[in-house]
Image: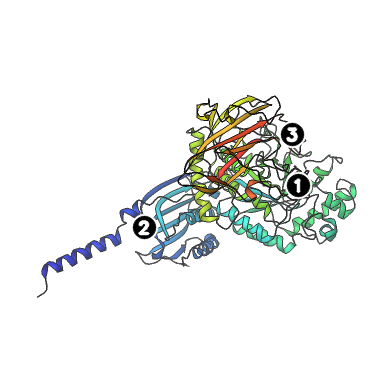
Amino acid sequence: MFNRNLLILIILLLSIDMLYAQVPTLKEDQRAVPALMPLPQRLEKRTGVFDFKHCQLIVVDHDDFIPEAKLLQKALKNQGIEVKIGKLPAEGTSYLILAKDEMLDAEFKQEAYRLSVSPGKISIKGLHKKGVFYGIQTLKQLISSDKKVVSCDIVDWPAFSWRAYMVDVGRNFQSVALLKQQIDVMAAYKLNIFHFHATEDIAWRLESKLYPQLTAPETMLRNKGDFYSVAQMKDLIAYCKERHITLVPEIDMPGHSDAFKRAMKTEMQSDTGLNIVKNLLREFIKTYNLPYLHIGADEVKITNVNFLPEVTQLIEQLGKKVIGWEPGGNFTESTIRQLWMEGATKVSKNKNIQYIDSRHLYLNHMDPLESVVTIFNRKISNLDKGNSSALGGTICNWPDRNISKPEDALTQNPVYPSMLAFSERSWRGGGIPGWMAKIGKPESAEALGFAAFENRLMQHKQRYFSRLPFPYVAQSDITWRLIGPFANGGDLTASFDPESVAVNIDSLPVAMKVVGGTIVLRHWWTPEVTGVLEKPQENTTWYAYRKIWSDDNETKDFWIGFNNISRSYASSSPEKGTWDNRKSNVHVNGVLIDPPAWKQAGLSGNMEIPLIDEGYEFRAPTQITLKQGWNEVLIKLPIASFKGADWKNPQKWMFTFVPVD
C-alpha cells in the first residue's frame, strides 16, 4: 500500500521547487549591478534577473532601429547568446525590444536612452538610433558570465556632445585593422568622434588621384609607401558611422606640410601651393561624405594672410564645417577652435565661437598612472557640462617620435586606460577645477571618488582588455609618507636622516601623506598642472616611505620609474647605472635596488631612434625580493634646478613604485 505521508512530502517538495523556479532566489536578488563605464546619469536597481537562456528574440518597433538590432544580435552571439529578430512573442515569453521614446526627462536627447530590465523583458528606448546604440553598449556590460542581467532602470545621456579620440597616423602609420581595434573600444565606451590626423611633415597618408606624387615612397621619411587608399578611407568612415562615430579628418595646412613641399616642389602658402591645396580640398570633399574638415593651422608662420581665409571660404562653400587648432592662424569666427594651449579665455568668452578642449589631454606627455588620474579629475572646458559653444573634448595621441612597430603607439602611450577615464568624464561631466596630476590625500573626497572609479576601471581591464595593451594597475590603495624637504645645496648625492641606519624612519616627522603608485611632486608645466607639493623648491631632497606586507618570502614584480619621457620630445635616455639624471634611488629593506641595464644608456635624444625600455610600462618589471611580514620601501627624490638640460628634457619631478598584478 502506497505511503500517504510520502505522497504528501513529494507534493510539498514539488510545490517548493515550482515556487523557486518562478521567484528569484535570495542569491539572485543579492546580485550586484556589474561595473559600468561610463557610469549612467541615473540608475535604480530592481528585484530579480533577466535570464538570456529563456530569451530568443529581439523585437524592433521602429525601422530606424533595425541596424542597431543587427549589431545587438551580433554582440550577443559573441557572448554565446543566439537570438532572432522578429515580432512580439506570445505572452509569457521573455524578449528584448528596441523602441522609440521622446526622452523628455533627459538632456542631449539625441544621444539619450532608457534601459529597463525586468525578469521577463529588456527594453532599450531612445529618440534617435544613437541613443539606442548607447543603450546597447550599457546592456553588453550588464550581462554576467552566466548570461543573466540584474533588473534595473537606467536613464542616461552625455554631458558633452563632442567626445573624441585623436590618432596621429601622419608621423607613424597604423594599419586599418589596428585603427578599427581602437574604434571598437571607442564605440563600446560611447566616444563619438574619431579625429584622424593624416598629413604631416613626415608623410602625406591620403591617396589623391589628382596628385599621386603626394603618397610616393620617396616623399615619406617613415613607413615609406604606407598610406590610406580611397577604398580604405571609405571603409574606415563607414565602420565609424555604423558605430555612431564621426570621422574627422585633419589635413594640416599651411604648417606641418614638408611632405607636401617635397612632393609638389612648392610651399603651401605660395600662389601655386594654394591652388594645389584648393584642388586637393575639392577632390577630398567630393570623394568623402563627412561633415567636418580639420585644417590644423598651428605652429606655423603665416606668410600669406589670404591662405586660411580662402581655404576656409572654399570648405564652407562646399558645405563643411572647418576646425583649427587654437592658438593657430588667422581664423574666422565660424571656425571651430580646438584648444591645445590657450587658457579658454578669448575663445570661451566669445559666444560666436565653438570650441573643443584638448588642453593637457595629450596622452604622449603622460605617465600611464598619472594619465588616468589627470583625465578623471579633468573638468572639460572648465564646465560641468557642454553647451552650444563648449562642445566637449578630445584626448590626443601624438607619438611624434619614431616607433619600432605600429602597436607601440598603444603600448608606449596609455591609450586604452585614458580612453576609459575620458569616457567617464566626457559622458558624466563634472570634475575638479584646475589640472591635477594627483589623487589627493588619504580619505579625502577626491581620493575616495577616484578609488570608486578605479575599482570599476580594474574590473573592465580584467573583463575586456586581457588581450589588448592596458598599461595601468591599481594605485588608489597605496599611501606614501613624504618626509622633507632637506636643503641639498645642489648636491644630488647628499644624504639625510631617512637614509641613516641609526634612525628609525617611523619616528621622523611626516610632511604629508599622499595616495598613488605614481607621485608627481612637481610637473614640468607647473603651475598650470599641479603635483603634490604646493610650493616645490629647487635644491631640495624629499623622501617617500611606505611599508608593504608579504605573507611569505617571495619575489615580486614592480613598476619602478623616476621619469616619464614624452613621446613627443627628443629626450635623452638615462645614463648607465642611474634611474634618472637626478640621482633618484630606491631602497627596499635597506637594500639598494639596481636600475635597469638600459639598452640605449646615455643616448642623446633623437626623434628617429625609437624608445625601447625607457618607460616602466614597456619594459620588463623590476623583480624585488620581499621577506615575510612588513617590508620597508624608501625612495630618495633629490633635485637641483627645475630647468632641464634643454626643452627636450624637462624636469618632471616624480616617481613610480607599484606592484604589478
Residue underneath mark 2: 119
* Image quadrant in which you'd find residue 345: top right
Residue at 65 percent of width and 48 percent of height: 413
Please report whichever mark, 1 or 2, sits nearer to the chain's N-terminal start: 2
Can the viewer see residue 216 in this picture? Answer: no
Front residue (pair 103, 488): 488
Q: Is tag 1's residue or tag 3's residue first in the polypeptide sequence?
A: 1
Q: Position of residue 295 (x, y in %)?
A: 76, 47
Percent of width and height locating residue 596: 66, 46
- Quadrant showing the N terminus: bottom left
Residue 622 seen in render: yes
Relative to 522, is 502 on the left or the right? left
Q: Residue furthest left?
A: 1
Q: Nearer the N terminus, badge 2 or badge 3?
A: 2
Q: How many labels does the image show?
A: 3
Q: Element under label 2?
A: loop
Judge the density around disc 1: few (<14), some (14-19), many (≥20) Cα neighbours within 10 Å. Answer: many
Residue marked by disc 3: 644
| Residue 146 percent location from the top left of the image | 42, 60
Task: Kindly report the distance in space between the C-alpha atoms of the residues bearing marks 1 and 2.
Answer: 52 Å
- In space, the residues marked 2 and 3 are separated at their CA atoms by 62 Å
> Which residue sits furthest front?
502
Q: Quadrant of residue 204?
A: bottom right
Given the image, on which type of amino acid does mark 2 rest? Pro
Distance CA(mark 1)–CA(mark 3): 33 Å
Report the disc number at residue 295.
1
